[in-house]
Amino acid sequence: MNAVLSPLSDIDTETSAPAVSFTPKEVLLGMSLEALRALVKTMDEPAFRAEQLHQWLYVKCVRSFDEMTNLKKSFRDKLAERFQVGSLVVDQKESSQDGTVKYLFRLPDGKVVESVLMYFEERGSYAMCLSTQVGCAVNCGFCATGKLGFMRNLSVSEIVEQYVYVQADSGKEVRNIVFMGQGEPMLNYDNLMDAIEILNRSAEVGMRHITISTSGVVPRIYDLAAKNMQLTLAVSLHAPDNETREAIMPINRKWPLESLMPALHHYVDTTGKRLTIEYILLAGVNDQPSHAHALGALLQTLKCNVNLIPYNPIGDDYGYKRPSGNVTHRFREVLSGYGKKVTIRVERGVDIAAACGQLANKVQDA
């Protein structure tokens, strides 16, 4: 069995725990162009080699130095002696009936993590759901990842490589990234920010096409507001009152609504950006008209859209059920009456356990 850290209350949520490197050679993916320039200089190579290397890593997305054909062989040999392109290995790849593909990556220390490639016909575009941690400390009651416990943060390289690997493997142009995979992104904040910079500047993913989803790590919301980036912040609210929210999201004990809501208003006021409020609907728990009215009142003055997510099953042992379509649409109608744009998420990959809340590293202990 893998060692699992205790729940949220027992780990330091104010700082990002460092990721541990297990690779015998340094990984190039995750290095910025500036870092590659410095590297090339130490190897007594012409400065333009850095731009060539950068192109192979982030645009052509190759997996080996031998594929970098415009680099002279002596330079490729020197690179191979000291470095490796990436460190992730695909253990499994599952395809859904709707075209979604789930990748199970094995990390250098033997742990595994999942990423999801999705195609949205209505937009004619691809998106990737990336993970930021192995497991998760937040342990929301409806989420399979939280049942794994928190094991460790992913490094900048491990975050970036998920995108680069899938881009190359799929042969698709993936221009949208959502940090809604395994882990709480804001509890790996420093690595997350560095990875976003690489994905934006090197892999050329537009900042407006990047979304961070958080369960409500209040200090990091203030930090992100100060950066005033053009990305989208999505907040997993899932209940309009502390009692209900605490029952399904233990993080509410640390940062209740009295702490979270001012942080969200501050974020909007500082950035001018509209938030996305994510709300998972659990039958008989938070899906009644009274909940919709309470949610509407709570969000009345907040610049936001609301995305409703009917519960995706993770096992009968947890006691939650998916609401009926009628209940979901009734909730939407009530909430829309408060002047909010309310959408119902069209889930992808439910049949391969790749939808929201279902990522569970099925071979974690194999």
Image (cartoon, rainbow, N blue to C red):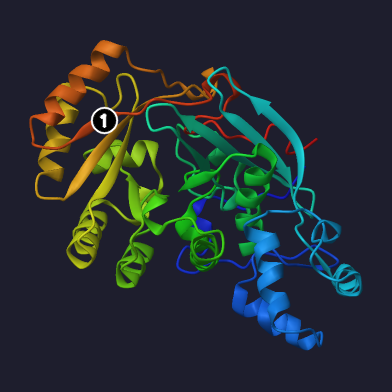
Q: Residue shown at 49%/25% (left/top)?
A: 318
Q: Is residue 217 left or right of residue 180?
A: left
Pick the quarter of the image with the N terminus: top right
Where 8 sits versus 32, above or below? above
Q: Is residue 79 left or right of residue 348?
A: right
Q: Nearer the viewer, residue 359 or 365?
A: 359
Q: How many residues crowd around disc 1 within 10 Å: few (fewer than 14), some, or many (20 or more)? A: some
Q: Is residue 360 left or right of residue 87?
A: left
Label 1 sits on residue:
343
Q: Nearer the viewer, residue 92 or 200?
A: 200
Q: Is residue 21 left or right of residue 172?
A: right
Where 70 sits versus 288, above or below? below
Q: Nearer the viewer, residue 51 or 43?
A: 51
Where 238 sits versus 208, above or below? above
Rendered location of residue 259, percent (x, y): 25, 58
Element under disc 1: strand
